[in-house]
Image (tube, rainbow, N blue to C red):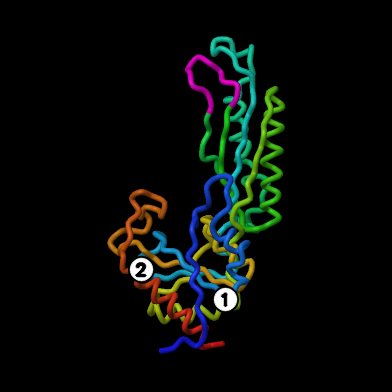
Amino acid sequence: ADLPGTVKFIFQPAEEGPPEGEEGGAELMVKQGVLDQEPIPQAIFGLHLVSAYHVGTIAYRPGPAMAAADTFKIVVQGRQAHGGRPWTGVDPLVTSAQILVGLQTIVSRNMEVIKEPAVVTVGALNGGVRSNIIPDKAEMVGTIRTFDQGMRQEVHERIRRVAENIAESAGATASVTIETGYPVTDNDRDLTKWAAPVLAQVAGPGKLVEGSKTTGAEDFSFFQQKIPGFFFWVGATPTNVPIEKAPSNHSPLFKVDESSLAIGAEAMASLTMAWLQAQ
């Protein structure tokens, strides 16, 4: 049958982010006019296979569904010294450890977590090469996850304040770089309300669920800043694997029941056809 409208497929690279210092992914495609060039789309749909649900389950959430994601780097500059004479230097490793602990108070003591969740995680801390040498500097990198723009900015400010002030108290300095990453994946509420019954038909009785917010992030959010968008999740974990034991998407042990691929394809096709017919 002929489609009662036009479908635009977006073949997007760098969904996990471009190489450091480069542009890429959905943000660059939007910047280059992918949503402004004919045919101009009026709505956009996206999905992700996830290990958080068994195969056959489809999950969705209206409004903010996935977190904004930013990265930070803190370089602590101290003064090199011999490990047997630490008083002659400024130890950037001890200072970095104090900063790392201080960062954990940003969410637990400063954020109104009953309003929206937030996460500050240090993923790597590096410095030094010898057991008996205090290095001159150390570096840590981490991620920030938020759902509220005001909280996002406050977390950025507090990271700078914590790092710089703790470093100063130790006689060191801290250079903080924060790279703004993906916005919140914010599902258009009207589009979500319309889409849910369509997905329910695909999933079958009891298989469509309203999921919780997730602190994962998606650059699909850049498309949603331009036009109404709806992003949902398709369960991929085999039914014989308990969800609490299922390796996450980014695990090398991630296991997919490939029948989820057909479910995802059917869901996207059904949404597309139903939306075009409704216009």
Main SS of the magenta segment?
Answer: loop
Residue that mark 1 sits on: 43
Using residue 105 as the reference point, say whether residue 196 is left or right of it.
left
Structural distance between the alpha carbons of marks 1 and 2: 22 Å
Q: Which residue is found at the position 52% from the left and 30% from the top?
A: 126
Callout 2 secondary element? helix
Image mark count: 2
Using residue 58 as the reference point, say whether residue 177 is left or right of it.
right
Task: Name the image quarter holding the N terminus.
Answer: bottom left
Q: Position of residue 86 (x, y in %)?
A: 59, 14
Q: Amino acid at mark 1?
A: Ala
Q: Which of the two discs, 1 and 2, labels the residue nearer the N terminus?
A: 1
Residue that mark 2 sits on: 261
Q: Residues within 10 Å of mark 1 (few under 14, many from 20)?
A: some
The residue stretch that appears in magenta: 127-137
Closer to us: 219 or 106: 219
Q: Do tag 1 and tag 2 residues touch (Cβ < 8 Å)?
A: no
Q: Which residue is found at the position 70% from the left and 22% from the top?
A: 171
Using residue 218 as the reference point, say whether residue 200 is left or right of it.
left
Task: Name the image quarter holding the C terminus.
Answer: bottom right
**Which corner quadrant of the image does residue 57 belong to?**
bottom left
